[in-house]
Image (cartoon, helix red, strand yellow):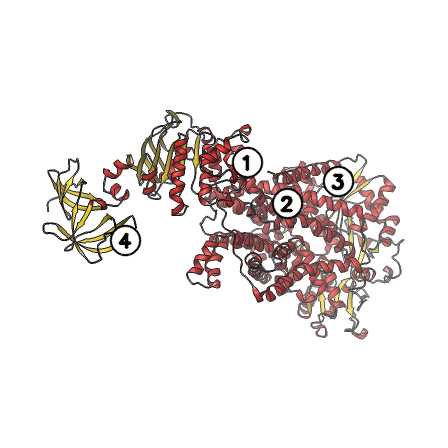
Amino acid sequence: MPRTRPLLVGTATAVALVLTLSSCSEEDDGPSITVYNAQHEELLTEIAPGFTEETGIDVELRHGDDFELANQLVQEGPDSPADVFLTENSPAMSLVDSEGLFAPLDGQTLRQVPDQYAPDNGHWMGFAARSTVLVYNTDLVSDAELPESILELAEPQWRDRIAFSPTGADFQAIVSAVLELEGERVTEQWLEGLAANGTVYDGNDVVMESVNSGEVDAGVIYHYYWYRDQQEAGDNSSNSQLHFFDDRDPGAFVSVSGAGVLESSDTPDDAEQFVAYLASEAGQQDIADSYALEYPLNPAVQLDDSVKPFEELEPPRVDLAALNGPQVIDLMQNAGFL
Amino acid sequence: MTSVTVQGVAKSFGGRQVLEGIDLEVPQGNLTAVLGPSGCGKTTLLRIIAGFVHPDAGVVRLGGLPVVGAGHRTLPPQRRRVGYVPQEGALFPHLDVRANITFGLPRGLRRGPRLADMLDLVELPRGVASRYPHELSGGQQQRVALARALAPDPAVVLLDEPFSSLDASLREGTGRAVARALHAAGATAILVTHDQGEALSLADQVAVMRAGRLAQVAAPPELYRSPADTEVATFVGRAAVLPGHVTDGFAQCALGEVVVGSSDVRGDALVVVRPEQITMSSPRDGLVEARVADVTFYGHDTAVHLEVLPSGPAVVARIFGVQVPARGAVVSLEVSGQVTAFGLPPRPLD
Amino acid sequence: MGAGVAALALLPLGFIAVYTVTVGPDEARELLLRPRVGELLVNTVRLVVAGIALSVMLGLGCAWLVERTRVPFGRVWHLLLVAPLAVPAFVNSYGWVSLTPRVEGFAGAVLIVTLSYFPLVYLPVSASLRGLDPALEEASYSLDHSRWWTFCRVVLPQLRPALLGGSLLVGLHLLAEFGALQMLRFPTFTTAIYDQYRSSFNGPAATMLASVLVACCVLLLYAELRLRGRRRYARVGAGVPRSVPRHELGRLNLLAVPALAGLVALALGVPLSSLARWLVVGSSTAFPMDELTAAASTSLTLGGAAAALTVLLALPVAWLAVRQRDLVSTVIERSTYVASSLPGIVVALALVTVSINVAQPIYQTFVLLLLAYAIMFLPRAVVIVRAGLEQAPPMLEDVSHSLGVGPLATARRVTLPLLLPSMGAGAALVFLAVTTELTATLLLAPIETTTLATRFWSHSSAASYGAAAPYALLMILISLPATYLLSRRPTEPVAS
């Protein structure tokens, strides 16, 4: 049976390799923490070595999406192997917090970033931020037309001209901001207007591409998509510009990436050290220097000057813990976005 | 080699009785054909003897030793030393002829002279040893299947409709070759078939099976001459079954007065007349007359389809030679030799 | 044993059932009886129906051209028509979206998922066409029936199991497809379940929505079972039928060759050229050899081990389905299909929950990950191993026993060699799925495990398409041997 052998040999090799792989991963004996990371992988692989160098604590990363890892933590409950949870946007932090899975952070850790970037209960904190912006096609939208408020996008002059991505946590955070600042009736009308005016896309990058190609005139995204594309090849941003809302408009909403220590951690002190490092000058400088182009939140650190400076943003004041509550979901479901 | 004894074997599948009270004795070195229409249960009987199917009741003995039933531990098929030749051969498609034939031999003997002996036995050239099943003709596949079954020197060989997939021209030659090989090997064999010609020509003994029961077990000439009932009579060879009345060794029927062979039958009866017993002559007084309805010429003989006048039954006469009556001609009929008669239950008076 | 495999495969279903109960009837009604759910249902159904129909047309048409006509370079076309399986659906749709935004929406979604999945129909149909007894067709021609009539009335019914099996796989994949459809902006139930997880605090509600997918899947399974009928398709005879005469295309070659070339260009050319473009123009393009090799070897290892495990688990299931053919074995076989119609996130979360509660030692180990792969991709192996088993009549095992060979030796010397080609093909198909799997890998792999798929995801979700491209390319490269294995013709005699 000459044909039998390759298959058997292949199977045996595969099994042997799996065994080798699984034995390799358990060899380290130094202190280490497990981080469930929903922030971009490249960002963390730049920060973690600095932390290990400073503290001697090894960082093991599991990557995933906000909602995947948040739901995983909820399912794992008290048996979770994770020590720290990092997200791109705050709602996933709120989800995990609502299940009572976070341990409170130390006051000193929290004090490194301004108060408004942590929930009142101090169970987690922001360590990076992205600003909502309007991306517009420079051939199709004149400067005079640019809206002062994101609420204007629901008005008739924008009919069939705008795009947005309502399924992501990002857009829901914006809706939360509108709800918090303007109340339920205005939010409802605004969503109705958006539904009538806009095209729904899935993902910020897709919105940006459609604006750039002239498929739609303008779209709502986070600032760093456009800046990153400029750095990559400029393919999807060459015909477009960014418009920042200001004056505490809901459209000037700044979403934060959160970090928190899990109650179930076996090494809460090491975990706390890691979160503290993220928000420290050294950690924040790593973020600022990375390709990520997200805003560091420690006032001591600045992004390079190609990006609109953080101090010039005028975001609305929104309670982070209130984002994406059931009411927001209801409103969006009624408008047919979910 | 060994005898096969089957006693009281019964089997049902999902509430349907397939075999019922089967008794069969196959003496050592004998080739017995189990003959029956498809679906009569003959393959199931074979599979019970081989050990693939467990009977609901009854005993199977190979060489006097029970292999199933009679309170003994059932012997699995691989310990029964039974060679099995299934329909269409069922050669292992992934193995060449050599590996197929030596499949059942212990590893040490696979390279020995047994392969050549077997190929000779089934009359195949030795060159086929390296061929694959799909490169063989149907007849060759069948012979390889037999060689494969005989190679481990089995006590008994079971053949399940082995020739049914072959062309008519191949069927007879292959059948004879297989029978010769079995006799040469001195094998006890059971051949299952629905082809009465095959059964009568190849077997030493024929067991006629009908709806799960054995209707008759006899040597071919006896079976033909003295069938157990009219159904056996018509199933084994052609026959006209005519109502008649028997008195003192003679029967009165649509073909006139005929001689009844050794029989205690009296009164109303069914009379079985074989086609070759009917002879024709130019019309003569005192004889039954018939019109030639159709003529089928086979070369070596001819079947003449007749309608007994004035409105009598249709019968077939088989005649030899080239003197063939024309269609539409009127002839006189006579019956030669003895016929078999089966008594009818007395009709209720009404 | 088969029942054990079925129980394993049904774990995610139990998870859904528990959460459906948790959510309660009122909230469930409110969530399910929304206009949006109706839209999603319509989208899902028309995508599945149109995707299957188009896959059948392409698969059948190509199989006929390659197997039954003298189209030039038949063997090359055969390889190229299987090769799209090596290109992950999300890479394919990425290529298309970056070529033209017009592919977004229903028509584009149907086109692109079909280009990705039609080989699942092409493969079994071409194998069936090859094994068909030409005598049947000749008999039909001799009765003065036209080619077209013969094809519809004689050939097509014989191809029914292959067509149905392939269509079932395509249907299951379309129910569970996420990445490609998200990129093509065509919302279905699966994309909506992801949205629900992403957008709300109510994970149980998202899980409950998956029960609609289960219902769709059960319908598909039932339909396939009914259409398949009770006939047996095993060839009993030992004789391999004569080789099939091929039709001379003549001038029709001028149509057939461009048609095949066009299809290959659409299914392979577009995604590959888009990858090539990113490799060239992306500023983040880099070839970190260490990371590339590490990710590739992990993907290879996981793919190989999962393929072996899945085929082993598929064996008893296929065995029951082919050799028992009663209600219980039918239920067992069918239940292994359910998980593959579910979004990866539902299966992964179900395994998180079950293993952390009852089997914590294997949580986030390779053992659990391999089990997850097996659960998700069992149907791919079951369909193929089952077809192989149907070609191996039990009579051959009886004969082997009668030759004095015991059950174990018979398995080794007869059954296994006969099943090997289909086991190999089933393993190849599982391997292809595992190398592109993402969600379960992210949630369940041992920490710090990186595969080609997770690397591709993390680069592309950071919009570093140049950096992502080498991983996609490697994914395709390591899938080529599996594709070649699949394209081998299983009815060819083993050693001649």
Residue type for callout 3: Ser
Extreme front residue here? B322
Expressed as whole percent of the image width and height from the top left, the position of residue A179 reads: 71, 62
Residue type for callout 4: Thr
Task: Choose between C280 and C460: the one closer to the eye.
Answer: C280
Give the mark, 1 or 2, whose residue is nearer the N terminus: 2
Q: How many marks?
A: 4
Q: Which residue is mark 2?
A: C373
Spatial CA distance of label 1 from label 2 is 30 Å
Placement of C162 over or under C3, stated as above or below: below
Q: Pointer 3 indicates a residue of which chain?
A: A
Q: Pointer 4 indicates a residue of which chain?
A: B
* Residue C268 quadrant: bottom right
Q: Which residue is mark 1?
A: C413
Spatial CA distance of label 3 from label 4 is 98 Å
Which residue is depicted at the point 45% across and 31% down? B77
Q: Nearer the viewer, mark 4 or mark 1?
A: 4
Expressed as whole percent of the image width and height from the top left, the position of residue C354 reads: 62, 41
Task: Choose between C19 and B47: the one closer to the eye.
Answer: B47
- Pointer 2 local density, CA inside 10 Å: few below 14, some 14–19, many at least 20: many
Which residue is depicted at the point 76% across and 53% down? C470
Q: Which residue is mark 3?
A: A265
Q: Pointer 2 indicates a residue of which chain?
A: C
Q: Is residue C437 visible?
A: no
Spatial CA distance of label 1 from label 3 is 54 Å
Which residue is depicted at the point 71% across and 38% down? A17
Q: Is residue C13 visible?
A: yes
Task: Choose between C476 and A312: the one closer to the eye.
Answer: C476
Residue type for callout 2: Tyr
Q: Which residue is mark 4?
A: B296
Placement of C494 over or under C174, stated as above or below: above
**Discs 2 and 3 lie in a common subunit:** no
